[in-house]
Image (spheres, grey):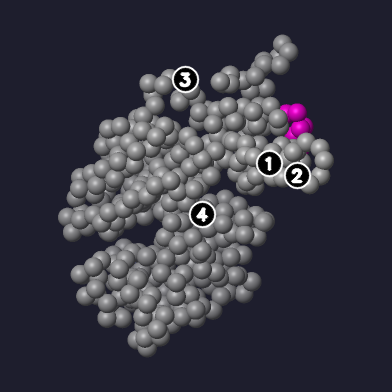
Amino acid sequence: MTSLSPRKTGSHGSTDLGDLRRGNLSLVLEAIREHSGLARAEIADRTGLARASVTTLAADLIDVGMVEERAPAQSVTPGRPRVPLFIAPFPFCIVVIEIDIDVVIVEASDLSGTVIVENRALHARATKDPDQVLGLAADLATKIINLLSAAGHRIVEVAIVIGAPIDRGGRVIEFPELEWESMDLAALVASRLATFDGPVAVYNEASMSTLAEARFQRQARSSPVRDLVFLGSRTGISGGAISGGTLLEGSRGLALTPGHIVVRPGGTACRCGRRGCLLAEAGPTAVLSNTGLDQVVTLKGMNFALEQLVVNAQVGHPETMTELRRVGGLLSEVMGQLQAVLDPEIIVLGGYWAQVLPSLEIEAPPHVEVVATPLGERSPRIGALETVVARVIQNPLETARPFVDSNSHNQ
Ligand SMILES: [Zn+2]
């Protein structure tokens, strides 16, 4: 087992050295996560660290179980074999709970982002009772937590994702679809997780999707994406923006709420009290009603009805095509307004909009690329996972410490 206190060199075992080592561990771990299979020499080249330092730092990360060596590929050249390093799929993992208006999804992933186990269940939206919905979420999560713990996994955090504004203290301000208001969601879920005493935190779905999309685009382009807007529609309309490389959050987590951008002044009444908002004019309720699918919503829920809408678009159903062109026109207008404010290089469409992008006939603003998300419905969960992993990378030994210090704290 490695020492978890800052390594002392000579007589200067100062905090500065601890900070330096932590920073270097973070550099090495980040390099391995961004580029699986790098050898130590390649990590040294990428990070600018000395090869000997990389060897020591990698050994520390292997000791705490965050990194592993795999068998070297057959070398055709003489000399020492090149040993590739990977993020260890075991024991560290993160559990993400997504609370949607129809469904609860619980997913556990390792630090590389690979899903270990997933479970989901429809909740009784009709009752809107937090006890029922959170009870169901906690039951699903507890089953997964117990399964992981029994197998020796170490759960770094339980992250909750919800499509609701969250204040700086982590309270959900409101979740109108279920008529929830001012809730300490993390505490309410934590109190129901009898077999988990680690950190539980809550994250905004739109922000998490935006981060996930930016990460994907960065990897796909092998270059940073500094100005990106995400717009998505599933059971509502959500959005987020990264400006100059920073996620815009706003004072109440409401920065860029595209559903309440007015697209038709004096138009349909919106639940926010104004008229003609994008949500009222082109939200899923309006679109499903205009395409004759409101009965399907009543019988089978909104997600199912949206799947039907996508199928109708794929077969070219005329009423659906007309409606999607209308939605696309309003979306194009919103994109034009967003360009004037945020000047993004790329706008990513998510939710069902991603599946019907050609039928929307979007007129992209000049110099803006409009693309469909390749991440599907997982994007908010990927974003939450990445947010937790980013914290782990900043301070890997601090993440490992509770599990090393005391086995009694293991779940
Ligand atoms: Zn509104």
- The local crowd at label 2, few if under 14, some if 14 to 19, many if 20 or more residues have their Cα within 10 Å, is few
Instruction: Count up the numbered dots.
Output: 4
Under circle 1, the secondary element is loop
- The local crowd at label 3, few if under 14, some if 14 to 19, many if 20 or more residues have their Cα within 10 Å, is few
Q: Quadrant of residue 82?
A: top right
Under circle 3, the secondary element is helix
Q: Quadrant of the N terminus?
A: top right
The answer to whether residue 243 is magenta is: no
* Amino acid type, callout 2: Ser
The reply to whether callout 1 and callout 2 are in contact (CB within 8 Å) is yes
Q: Which residue is mark 4?
A: 212
Q: Which residue is mark 3?
A: 405
Quote the CA–CA distance across marks 1 and 4: 31 Å
Quote the CA–CA distance across marks 3 and 2: 40 Å
Quote the CA–CA distance across marks 3 and 4: 33 Å
The reply to whether callout 3 and callout 2 are in contact (CB within 8 Å) is no
Of 207 and 272, the residue lying toward us: 207
**Label 3 or label 2, whichever comes before in sequence order:** 2
The label number, if any, that marks residue 75 in the structure image: 2
**Label 1 or label 3, whichever comes before in sequence order:** 1
Q: Is mark 1 within 8 Å of ligand 1?
A: no
**Label 1 or label 4, whichever comes before in sequence order:** 1
Under circle 4, the secondary element is helix
Q: Nearer the viewer, mark 3 or mark 4?
A: 3
The reply to whether callout 2 and callout 4 are in contact (CB within 8 Å) is no
**Left or right of 12: which side holds 309?**
left
Q: Which residue is mark 1?
A: 72
Report the residue at 32% width, 66% height from top.
303
- The local crowd at label 4, few if under 14, some if 14 to 19, many if 20 or more residues have their Cα within 10 Å, is many
**Left or right of 315: which side holds 224?**
right
Q: Nearer the viewer, mark 1 or mark 3?
A: 1
Q: Magenta stretch?
A: 48-53
